[in-house]
Every structure is written in C-alpha cells, then in structure tokens.
Image (cartoon, helix red, strand yellow):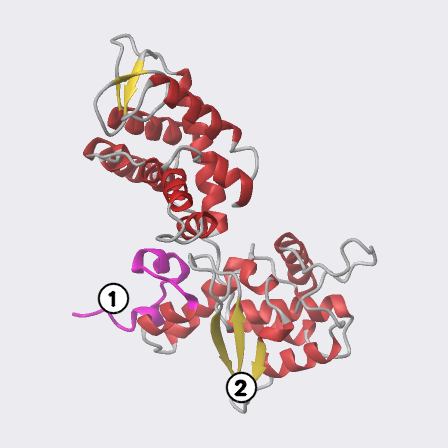
Amino acid sequence: MKSAHFGGRPRVGRGPTGGGGGGRQRTRQRRLSAGQRGEGRGASGQSALADSKIAQLSHLAAENPNLSPPPSQVQELIQSSKADRTVAAYLAVITRFVAWHQAMDCSDGALDGSAAAALFLAQEHSRTKGKTEGARAALIWYFDLLGCQANPARAPIAVAMAQGAQRRAPPVVHHEKVMGEEMKLIYSRFTGPNLSLIDHRIGTVLSLLFGAFLQVSEVVALRKDGISFDSGRVWLAIRRSKTDQLGKPERRPIARSDGAYCAVANLEKWIARVPRLASLFPCLSTATSTANKPMSADSVRAELQRVLQACGIARLLTPHSFQGGAATMAVEKGVPVRAVMAMGHWQSPGGFAPYVALNAKILAGADNLL
C-alpha cells in the first residue's frame, strides 16, 4: 500500500488517517496496534488512540490549567461515552482493521478512506457470514476519535456494504421459549429452603430470568445490597445491562403472586440462606480463590442442563429461553407490547420480535379477519 487518505487529501504513508504526515501516521498505527493487546479501558484504551483528538484535548487542558479541567478528567469523559464491554469489542475490530489496512497493496498509489472502510466490512462479512453493523460502529467510533474531517465509515459506500451484509446474513436461529407449565415444574423442583444450596441457587436464578425478563449476565451480577422488598413486590438493582452504555444501575420490579409459584417469596427464602457475601448468587466453591466470586454465566448454562434433565424437559432451552418465554406469556395475557419491551429493556421492535413466539393466542384473531 503506497498511500492512503481518510477524511482529507491523499497523504503518503501507511496509516489509515489523513491530515498529517506519513511518519506521524505510521507512529499512530504502531501505537494503536500495541494498544489492542488488553481489553477494556485503562492503559490499552488510552494507548490505542495515543495521537487522537483525546490526546490533543488532554494536551490543551494541560497547557491551560486555569481554563480547563485536569487532562485525566477530559480523557475519562470521552472514554466513558461507551461502556467498557463496548470499548473492548470495538478495539478488537480496530485491531483487525489496522492489521488488515497495513497489509493492503494498492497499485495506483492511493487508497481512498471510504473504499478501505467498505472493503474491510466486506472482509468482515466474508469472515463471519454475518452482519457488519457492529464492525461499522467500531470504525465510526475510531475515525471520530481520530478527528477525521469526513468519517469514512459513514460514507454511502460503507453504508451500502453494511446493508448488503445485513441482507445476505443467514437467518438468526432463535431460542425456544420456556412455557408456563415448564416454569412451574422447574419452580416446584428447584426452589425452597429444604433443597441444597446449589439446587436452590439455580432455581432462584431461573425464576428471576423469567420473572424479571433478565439476561443471564444481569442476574449473575446482582448484589444483595441491591435488593429491596415492599408489600407488593421486590425491586432489583440491575448493575449490568446489555443495552446500558452509561453504567448506571436500573431498578426492575417483580410483583408478588398469590399462587404457589411466587418468585418474590422464593427470593426472600434464598436471601435468608445465602452465605454472607456481597453477591446474590455466589460461586459456592470450596476453593478460596473463587469462593467470594459471583456465579458465572457459563455455570448457569451448565446447571440449566441438569435442571432440564431432572425435570424431564427434552426441549433445548437456554437462559435466553426464559426471557423470551416471559415476554411471550406477557403478550398472551394482553400486556401492552411497549410495557413488555420496557420491562425487558428492548429498545426496538426489531430486537424484541425474536423473543416472542407467534401463536394463536398472541395473534388474537388477527389471522382470521374474514
């Protein structure tokens, strides 16, 4: 590759950004590559964009202490615009993009930034056969922080490539939804103070997945100090959400039930038994190194298979099946779709639709209008 220009005039050099000399761009890319070996925020996230707008703003803040906040605060504000897990996912894409771009050959001596972004998205699609919107979002974030005048990942050709990948992506295989009778069977076999701690723990986890429309990552992150009861319900402080970019806990209610399968009553019994640890669902390991850690999502998946076998449930249910089963049952009962989406933190109808199983009760006569 002889030259590239991303967001400016063509510049000689191997880096994927314009608006600077080739040597400076090569340095930027070496620093970016070195910064991808870690995950999350911290040192790796800062070194990944060492010559970006973040560094420029930090330098200005340091030179003007009476007119600006400390440079560390400037960096934290910008980097906190995305959740840690999102940053880690974006950095993985950026790592691949930088390595791919540096290995590219361009016979005419110039590689247009938007063309490079589009071709990389095509490469991502060929690698995964899936959608590339996540990769495009990572590139948008990358070029925005580099300070490109025109973001190559927002160019029409890059948008068209992402749309084409979306149309050609294989259909999503949706999880089966747990049914009400299956939930009652699980509840009767795996909740109650007479069970072992391990059995009572997984039963309580599954009841919260279903009763509060939770993701498995949200359940295992629950803490005892984030649980509060009142006369009619329990409130859960959700510390980690799939759609949360701000890192702020969200309160989620579960109403008490007069029936035999009350998730709130079971949770009260579980809290009375759980070891004196911060996590609501501790690892329960005898090993000192892991005893105080919360239960992992992988442990939930493994124990779920044991629960299904013990209950004689042959269907391939996953933790997602409980959130989807709860959403399906709520819609069947006539709960407004917007309320169900709010409860499960679904932000778009497209993201919500796969979680609801279509059946005659949900269609409510819409399949027989004439």
Secondary structure beneath dot 2 equals: loop
Which region is colored magenta? 344-370
Judge whether residue 262 can be spotted in this image: no
Residue sitting farthest toward the bottom: 231
Q: In the displayed structure, does residue 319 sit left or right of residue 369?
A: right
Residue sitting farthest toward the top: 107
With respect to residue 355, does 264 lie above or below? below
The label number, if any, that marks residue 367 in the structure image:
1
Where does residue 33 sit, x and y in percent of width and height?
A: 49, 27
The label number, if any, that marks residue 257 in the structure image:
2
* Residues packed near mark 1 inside 10 Å, few (<14), some (14 to 19) or many (20 plus): few
With respect to residue 123, does 231 lie above or below? below
Q: In the displayed structure, does residue 327 sit left or right of residue 321?
A: left
* Residue 185: quarter of image: bottom right
Where does residue 192 sit, x and y in percent of width and height?
A: 71, 78
Residue 356 covered by magenta stretch: yes
